[in-house]
Amino acid sequence: MLNRILKPEVAWPAAVILLLCVGIGSALAVLLFSRADGGAEVLSDYYRKGLAWDSTAQVRSAAGRFGWTIDLVPADSTDGSGMRAVRIEITDSTDHPVADLVIDVEVSRPHLAAPVGHATAMAHVQPGTYVAWLPVREIGVWDFEVRGRNGPTPFTARFRREILR
């Protein structure tokens, strides 16, 4: 039955052309989807950041040397202006809250080089609990960097959280 619809001298070249078109179409689709959100970006000053890796690692480990536990919890939803509350809880090695710190929080997307937002966390009603309002409007994976000082010693902590709504 197929022999009557398509002759072999037409069917085989048509099949090869169809396979080539599918390959080219899928490659174009991958290219289009990979560029839809701007694609991955190169970090600015990546060379300087690489040279400063030892001091950066020392600052990142400072909270551990203090014996602190730092936790970051984004709110489930945004307010009317698209800002989301991010709660930072800091306790010491005896599980007591660490109060009277000045904390800055920076939020970014993993695929973007520049940060999306930055805010200073305000002390909350409870000691050791700080709240920052950040522009985390979209669902997906977000990176949060908490920076502060304990006297003269700076500390920092990084968190990756998935925002589901």
Image (spheres, rainbow, N blue to C red):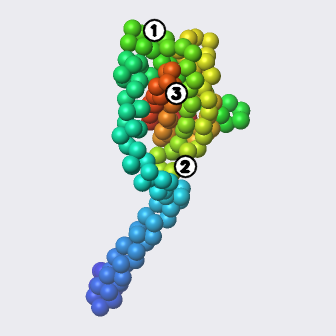
Mark 2 residue type: Ala
- Crowd band around label 2 with a 10 angstrom C-alpha radius: few (<14), some (14–19), many (20+): some
x, y percentage for residue 152? 49, 24
Q: Secondary structure at mark 3?
A: strand
Q: Is residue 72 visible?
A: no
Q: Nearer the viewer, mark 2 or mark 3?
A: 3
x, y percentage for residue 57? 37, 36
Q: Is residue 123 visible?
A: yes
Residue at image coords 50%, 39%: 142
Q: Secondary structure at mark 1?
A: loop
- Residue beneath disc 1: 96
Task: Tell me the distance, in whole angstroms, between the alpha carbons under discs 2 and 3.
Answer: 20 Å
Mark 1 residue type: His
Marks 1 and 3 in Cβ contact (< 8 Å): no
Query: Disc 2 or 3, which lies upstream in sequence?
Result: 2
- Residue beneath disc 3: 148
Task: Tell me the distance, in whole angstroms, between the alpha carbons under discs 1 and 2.
Answer: 35 Å
- Crowd band around label 1 with a 10 angstrom C-alpha radius: few (<14), some (14–19), many (20+): few
Q: The C terminus is located in which quarter?
A: top right
Mark 3 residue type: Gly
Nearest to the observer: residue 105 or residue 155: 155
Query: Disc 1 or 2, which lies upstream in sequence?
Result: 1
x, y percentage for residue 118? 60, 37
Q: Secondary structure at mark 2?
A: loop
Residue at image coords 47%, 57%: 42
**Which label was assigned to residue 114?**
2
Task: Tell me the distance, in whole angstroms, between the alpha carbons under discs 1 and 3.
Answer: 18 Å
Residue at image coords 60%, 40%: 117
Query: Disc 1 or 3, which lies upstream in sequence?
Result: 1
